[in-house]
Image (spheres, helix red, strand yellow):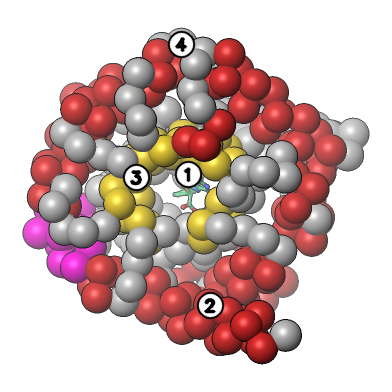
Amino acid sequence: MGILNATPDSFSDGGRFLARDAALHHAEQMLAAGVDIVDIGGESTRPGAPPLALDEELERVIPLVDELRDAGVAISIDTYKPEVMAEALAHGADMINDIWGLRLPGAIDAVAHSTCGLCVMHMIGDPQTMQSDPAAAYDDVVADVARFLAERVAALEAAGVSRSRISVDPGFGFGKTVEQNYALLAHLPRTAPADLPVLAGMSRKSMLGAVTNKPAPERLAASVAAAVLAAERGAKIIRVHDVAETVDALKVWRATCAAS
Ligand code: 7PM
């Protein structure tokens, strides 16, 4: 899954992909590099970031859905707003990726009657408050995340959503300490119901900066390493900025799997 920022204030792309043409160019590069899913995000979820107005998010996201709908790639929408979900699905989006785990009022209703794929992510608090005291937020981070994700899956199934549509994500960097993020990576299979695909998103995140001592633009090698470690632990979808490099690394991992 390649990240397509339709936001002017993302911490690692610094607004370079604000312009629609630039976003489309970026999408084409990801397609050429072998991406399977393009994840379009209109709102930065940077800790402390102000929420984006609905109209503005729609204006950033929907034209990209229209442009990429027939490009031969699955389109995912990174949003927690039910109105954006509904509008993107009406325009042909294939998947909804919600950092709020479809917890906001109306979110489940917005997706229940479609056949789109879903990603349910774990997050404690909200993007403004989640890093306030992550160390104290869990008994056992792996068990707590697993319980949360199982509950969200149950809520979706109770609303009539088929399990076959759902993927789950421990939410790296969303209200976790560095140690907690690495515990989730180390024990990735235990964070999720065994039958559901796991999505892992660590690309350029601060858990990588914490051990390499490098800023976001210099976390490529660390991001690729994290992607391979997640794949090795069963992740089926890896959310990344650097598609070409990650695809190469995963080819090496897959060739090794095939030989073992
Ligand atoms: C600022 C801070 C900008 C954080 C962007 C981010 C995930 C996601 C994001 C993830 C799923 C980023 C995050 N992260 N969706 N959306 N899983 N499913 O670093 O880990 O890309 S936004």
Mark 4 and mark 1 lie on one chain; the one further toward the N terminus is 1
- Tell me the distance, in whole angstroms, between the alpha carbons under discs 1 and 3: 19 Å
Contact check, label 2 and label 4, Cβ < 8 Å: no
**Residue pointed to by mark 3:** 76
**Residue pointed to by mark 1:** 46
Mark 4 and mark 3 lie on one chain; the one further toward the N terminus is 3
Looking at the image, is 209 positioned above or below residue 70?
below
Q: Residue at x 35, y 50 (%)?
A: 39
Whole-percent x, y for residue 61 in the image: 21, 40
- Tell me the distance, in whole angstroms, between the alpha carbons under discs 2 and 3: 21 Å
Q: Could one spot residue 45 in this view of the protein?
A: yes
> Which circle marks residue 250 in the picture?
2
Kind of residue sitting beneath label 3: Ser
Whole-percent x, y for residue 130 in the image: 64, 34
Mark 1 and mark 2 lie on one chain; the one further toward the N terminus is 1
Q: Which residue is drawn at 35% across and 56% down?
A: 37
Corner quadrant of residue 245? bottom left
Dot 3 beta carbon under 8 Å from ligand 1? no
- For the residues carrying marks 2 and 4, which lies nearer the camera in this image? 2
Mark 3 Cα shell of 10 Å, populated few (<14), some (14-19), many (≥20)? many
Disc 4 secondary structure class: loop
Kind of residue sitting beneath label 1: Arg
Dot 1 beta carbon under 8 Å from ligand 1? yes
Whole-percent x, y for residue 222 in the image: 60, 75
